[in-house]
Image (cartoon, rainbow, N blue to C red):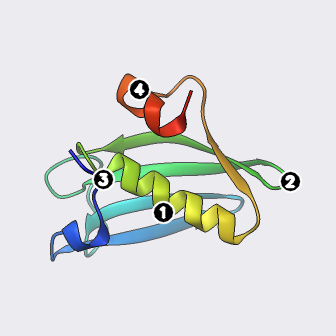
Amino acid sequence: MPIKTVADLPQNVSLRVVEDGNDFEFRLADLDGSMACPNDEMLGALEVKRIGEGLWMAENIAAVHGWGPWLVDVAMEYVTEQKCALFPHSFSIVPDAKMMWKV
């Protein structure tokens, strides 16, 4: 299955960035953002934690098949704009994601 794009988002779904101090979460959820992840109404979520100067860690990625890589791509763009780097939590990489992270 190819990576999803913004064109694949259902009409009632939005990307929300929820910031909490030095951490943030990307959520693909219904328009009011109230659904838990993942289920029929929330396609996925990804948490990113600042662990050092210029270094962020992606963890707790949960997504309906096909949306995980898109969420990671969005997170990479977000941290790159801040001149930072993103890497995966070493204990939470599922086999299907190893190619994406090149580990």
Compare residues 6 and 1 and report the one nearer the observer: 1
- Percent x, y for residue 55? 76, 50
- Judging by the rendered image, the residue that carries numbered circle 2 is 53
Q: Quadrant of residue 32?
A: bottom left
Which quadrant of the figure contains the C terminus?
A: top right
Q: Which is nearer the N-term, disc 2 or disc 4?
A: 2
At label 3, which amino acid type do we have? Ile
- Judging by the rendered image, the residue that carries numbered circle 3 is 3
Q: Which is nearer the N-term, disc 1 or disc 2?
A: 2
Q: Which is nearer the N-term, disc 2 or disc 3?
A: 3
- Judging by the rendered image, the residue that carries numbered circle 4 is 94
At label 4, which amino acid type do we have? Val
- The answer to whether the residues at label 4 and label 3 have Cβ atoms under 8 Å apart is no
- Percent x, y for residue 78? 59, 67
**Residue drawn at (43%, 42%), measured in percent from left and top?**
61
- The answer to whether the residues at label 2 and label 4 have Cβ atoms under 8 Å apart is no
Q: CA distance from mark 2 to mark 3?
A: 30 Å
Local secondary structure at mark 2: loop
Q: Which is nearer the N-term, disc 3 or disc 1?
A: 3
Image height of 70 relative to 60, above or below: below
Query: In the image, 30: left or right of 98?
Result: left
- Judging by the rendered image, the residue that carries numbered circle 1 is 74
**Residue drawn at (70%, 62%), measured in percent from left and top?**
21
Crowd band around label 3 with a 10 angstrom C-alpha radius: few (<14), some (14–19), many (20+):
few
